[in-house]
Image: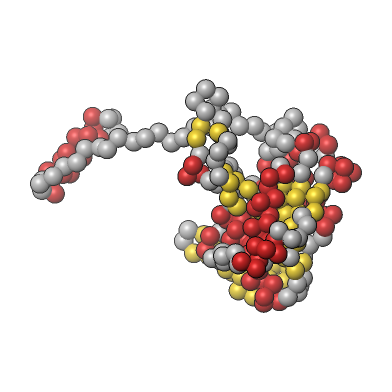
Amino acid sequence: MKIVVCIKQVPDTVEVKIDPKTGTLVRDGVPSIINPDDKTGIEAALELKERVGGTVTVISMGPPQADVALREALAMGCDEAILVSGREFGGSDTYATSGILAAALRKIGYDIIITGRQAIDGDTAQVGPQIGEKLGIPQVSYVQEIKEAAEDHLIVNRYFEDGYHIIKIKTPCLLTAIAELAKPRYMTVSGIVDAYEKEIKIIGFDDLKDDLELDMIGLKGSPTNVYKSFTKEVKGAGTILKDVSADQAVAAIMEKLEAKHII
């Protein structure tokens, strides 16, 4: 079984800053990490490999420095790493990104594709499902548990706020992982050494151009674009009422709501 995990290298949102003039992210000096949901997907893939056998390939689209994230995945236990990279891909939105990754996945082959639910630098939750649609394979999003795994099918729990669905899905298929699916393992010392001895395969524009919508890649070909980025506004401390009865507290709250024309 060939399991492929799509990952993204993202800025650590704890350290993110916004340029007040341009409204864009300041990436210089900001540490990068593997997107948390994608890291969960890596662990889920490794556990699947341990259950049913096969290999785990990790793939990422990004600039050359994204190889750091790929090597971390190798150090966790993945067998192979592939970087999809090219100037022509720069600035791609979710639609363009999913098309490029789908072309790369067709090229390398797969039985199961796992992506994270969403990336912390965009929160769209679109790329995984779009890949599934473009490949024409069944997909289940918000997977919180893989209950059964076999060569020709999986049985998974799909999370909902008020419960979950139990779904049987034929392979090849695509899953998007949420945090509850698995707890990522740590890298090992030997894994780190091995990771930096392995070659990361590069797939570029020329390798995929015959299988791409050439007018729908990169910044110019993206149907959407970011208008503005901004940090959350700092909220005030609010009003703290001390030593008041329940009736007095309710009266004070009602007075505030009426003053703000909320009620």
Vertically, is 166 above or below 72? below
Point out the image quarter for the N terminus.
Answer: bottom right
Point out the image quarter for the C terminus.
Answer: top left
Q: Which residue sits furthest right? A: 210
Q: Nearer the viewer, residue 209 or 253?
A: 209
Q: For the point 57% across and 66% down, which residue is it?
A: 185
Q: Quadrant of residue 166?
A: bottom right
Q: Nearer the viewer, residue 195 or 86?
A: 195
Q: Is residue 251 visible?
A: yes
Name the spot of residue 248 as percent of width and height, x first.
12, 43
Q: For the point 16% across and 42% down, which residue is it?
A: 241
Name the spot of residue 59 as percent of width and height, x first.
72, 54
81 on left or right of 189 = right
Q: Nearer the viewer, residue 183 or 260?
A: 183
Name the spot of residue 239 as percent of width and height, x first.
21, 37
151 on left or right of 41 = right
Q: For the point 84% across and 54% down, which residue is it?
A: 107
What is the basis of the colouring in this image? Answer: secondary structure
Q: Nearer the viewer, residue 245 or 233?
A: 233
Q: Quadrant of residue 213?
A: top right
Vertically, is 185 above or below 127? below
Q: How many marks?
A: 0
Q: For the point 82% across and 60% down, which residue is it?
A: 109
Name the spot of residue 31 as percent of width and height, x first.
55, 45
Q: Is residue 222 visible?
A: no
Vertically, is 78 above or below 97? below
